[in-house]
Amino acid sequence: MTGIQTQTKDNCHLMATPAPSSTMSDSPKKKGPSIHQIYSVPAPIRTFPLPAFYPDNPVSLFAVAYAWLRQTIFPPPPEPSVVHQGIWSEATNSVHITDERSVRALWEQGFYGKGSLSRSEPNWLKREQVRRGQQDVHVSEVLTLQRREERAQAKWERARVEQEAIRQTKLREAQLAGAETRSRVDILLPGPPRTAFAAPVGPLELLSLPNSTAEATSIVASCGVHGPLKTAGPASEGDVISESADLVHDGTADADLRHWRQEIGRTAGISQSRNLGAVQDGTDKSNAQPQSFVSETGSSHRSIGEKPLRRQKSVRFSPQVESATFNLTDPPSPDRSPNGGVKQPLPNGEAGNFVAAEKAAEASSPSGSIAPDQAIINKEHLQLMPEEAFFLMFGFGALSVIDPASGRHLSVKELLLLFRQHSYFPPRREPDDADLEPDDGFLVHYAVYHHFRSLGWVPRGGIKFGVDWMLYTRGPVFDHAEFGLMVIPSYSDPWWKAKGKKASSKTWPWLHSVVRVLSHVMKSLVLVYVEIPPPPQFEATMDRGFAQAMKLYKIQEIMVKRWSSNRNR
């Protein structure tokens, strides 16, 4: 992990700079095939296009004729050559793919679905093998987690350096202010030097507190104070002023002297309760003797008529003391996880990454040790959204969905009806439920998904960024999404206006919030308006086929960008 070094500049500011990493592995990890080779097939079917024909190059005509004759005489196998099997899950409203070959094929040939135990790519098995040391390969999520740990450690170290600089500055200012105050008090109230008690604040000082009256008496006697000690109870202002009355003559003290007497009188009780609060007298309540306290000037005074406090226990603290309060100015600790647990440090004392910490924990626990060659059962499956599953089945014919209740394969019409029913909440499956409308959630979103898939884009779910879909140029492996889509149904047909149907209105704060989120992650918002056909026309067209009904949906895109006066000049 990247370390942190502190450097002092000429202007006396502390700066945190990253130090060169000393944990680099001597041997680089094994590199597999290039991502361009892994994701060379953009769809789960193979195509056999003819070569390009160039009019200015007559030789290209022979290449086109040769390819055409070859495919005519020796036709290629029908596509799709492989039909993947999926199971409908009503609980998650998705289609599950459990076969490992189908999972890898659907992900590598179009980026369909997501891993149930992964952020995007289904690579839980590979991560588990790397964690147990069975493989030494590149895993994107592990590297992402390591970078996040390094950034968190760097931020914590930077905050710690800044807090230390602030603390040192405040300490110097407090020392200067204390020295100035003591000098002014010594000038106004001259007297023999007294030994001041320091408030016990550290663990070692708390451990050195006296546990009996004899120890307390010996400690106080060594400081030059005699007589019984008062364990608690603030002193009045008159007590302190009467103590220092013999130091100055009446009528000769000026306004400053009277001011400092009042200040000492107000603070004497508080300071003594902190300094001598742990000293107990050990006397009985019935025959309590008059007690005295030690002021900041070192003189003692006997208070009359005051009742002694009840004797309290002497508490011993552990040398390792942790703060029980939360302070907003405290920097975050890298040794604590976000859920409140304490991370286990590595053997070298550093807060390592997630993988290294788990390896160290497994190595230290004999009962939880795992053999490196132990077989791992893949517990992950691929989840397909309804739009993705229907596109694979209706568009390519590369997927077959099984109904878990009956165990039979669903047809395209049955799967369409199932997805449309579950686009409402609760699902409209009963005969008494309302009829399905052409503006249900599945039809509107599938029209948008099919539109952009046919144009070569890779749409994926955008709930992470508060939008309906995210558009990738090639896929999440190659680049980040460039656009976020918000699907808005439009009812401009006269039939809808006669019925009084209107689209749900959106507010300006909603639009501003979506644009702000997307602009923060360098993405642009695209409002996709889908023209909804009237129900009579839609039902009549559905009798001729679903492909004809999809032609009734018109799509219009409008891109919205956040305008900035500094950037857009």
Image (cartoon, rainbow, N blue to C red):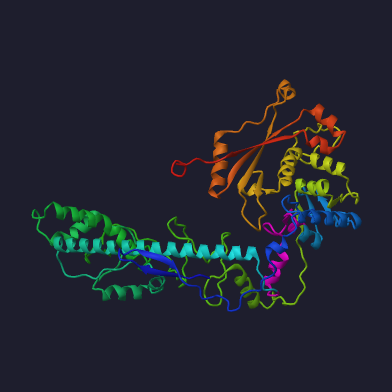
| Magenta stretch encompasses residue 130 | yes
Q: Which residues are magenta?
A: 106-134
Given residues 289 and 486, the one toward you in this image is 486
Task: Describe residue 366's horizontal placement relative to residue 539 as left or right.
Answer: left
* x 38%, y 72%: residue: 205
**Residue 99 image point, x, y percent:** 82, 61
**Residue 488 image point, x, y percent:** 66, 35
**Residue 30 image point, x, y percent:** 66, 74
Q: Quadrant of the C terminus?
A: top left
**Residue 57 image point, x, y percent:** 73, 54
Task: Describe residue 374's horizontal placement relative to residue 326 as left or right.
Answer: right
Viewer can see residue 288? no
Q: Does 335 appear above or below 95?
A: below
Given residues 228 and 153, the one toward you in this image is 153
| Magenta stretch encompasses residue 124 | yes
Q: Does 188 appear above or below 493?
A: below
Given residues 277 and 81, the one toward you in this image is 81
Residue 24 lies in quadrant: bottom right
* x 79%, y 62%: residue: 100
* x 42%, y 57%: residue: 329
Given residues 485 and 301, the one toward you in this image is 485
Task: Describe residue 207's horizontal placement relative to residue 511 as left or right.
Answer: left
Q: Residue furthest top?
A: 498
Viewer can see residue 165? yes
Residue 287 lies in quadrant: bottom left
Q: How many marks?
A: 0
